[in-house]
Amino acid sequence: MSETTPATLPDDFVLTRRGAAAAIAAGYAVLATAVDAEPIITPDTGLTTGMVTMGGGLPGYVARPEGDGSHPAVIVVSEIFGVHEWIKDVCRRLAQAGYVAVAPNFFYRADPENALPTLTEMTEVRKIVATAELDQQMADVKTTVDWLAAQPFAASGRTGITGFCWGGAVVWMAAAMVPGLKAGVAWYGRLTGSDDRPYPLTSVETLKAPVVGLYGGLDRGIPTSDVEKMGAALASAANPVAKASAVNLYGEANHGFLADYRPSYNEAAAKDAWDRMMAHFKANI
């Protein structure tokens, strides 16, 4: 796995035979689905949804308000499990709020059949995710930005980005490296990494779009000390975009606290953090 944006492997991965079968049938990531989860199901009423192919063959799931008119856009970067049903539901939630939401499949080159959500061995997941190195991640984000810019239903120059776990780290890096993004929201994305590669904590001074980071205080993969370091780095930065960014820590929440298909789902933290994201996008895109 890329040292730049390694996936966090928290304690909330639960798998049983019954749970695996149910997760596959419903389209959720098998390795993270709680047997007794009651995931939110967002209807596609009033939306246009489906798969698209962007530049270079990059596939993605899109949800947007139906009909004529243009809308601000949000790129949705998945967890290590790729574009599964929960990621699609997040896109529909954003679309119901008036955004064009597109979730690129960053792993399609190594996983053309999108088998990631059905895998039951983390070692197999890691092999696929490891193929998406930083340069490719940033290129795929740029491809998505460019594709949105060419769509009549996407408002020109009004694109943000959000992502979860692996995707949360991608958000921080894209906000620093990819032109054309107006705002980012990073959900429990790794902040530190290898000394010889860029990672979020070293990219504060190059942020081009303000980022809101959302973290859980019980997350074993991302220590509270890392979140505090990032907060201090943003506050002390010379870069005005960094000063306009912030990190928020939910002390009683774990990794994956927005993911209502996981046992780590925390309703109170999820609602507050979602509201923070929507306010950030409203103010900036």
Image (spheres, helix red, strand yellow):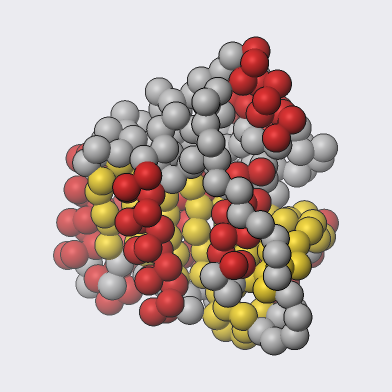
Please say whether residue 199 is visible from this viewpoint: no
Q: How many marks?
A: 0
Q: List the single residue furthest toward the top.
A: 17
Identified at 81% across, 40% down, the residue is 112
Picture quarter with the N terminus: top right
Indicate the quadrant where residue 39 lies: top right
Q: Position of residue 80 (x, y in %)?
A: 57, 37
Viewer-side residue, 65 vs 188: 65
Image vertical order of residue 283 relative to residue 24, above or below: below
Please say whether residue 159 is visible from this viewpoint: yes
Q: Position of residue 220 (x, y in %)?
A: 31, 29
Identified at 48% across, 79% down, the residue is 285
Image vertical order of residue 106 relative to residue 236, above or below: above
Indicate the quadrant where residue 222 lies: top left
Image vertical order of residue 92 relative to residue 118, above or below: below
Q: Viewed as shown, does residue 19 lie left or right of 202?
A: right
Image vertical order of residue 251 relative to residue 183, above or below: above
Q: Viewed as shown, does residue 26 lie left or right of 215?
A: right
Q: Position of residue 40 (x, y in %)?
A: 55, 46
Indicate the quadrant where residue 139 lies: bottom right
Identified at 19% across, 48% down, the residue is 228
Viewer-side residue, 271 vs 230: 271
Identified at 74% across, 30% down, the residue is 25
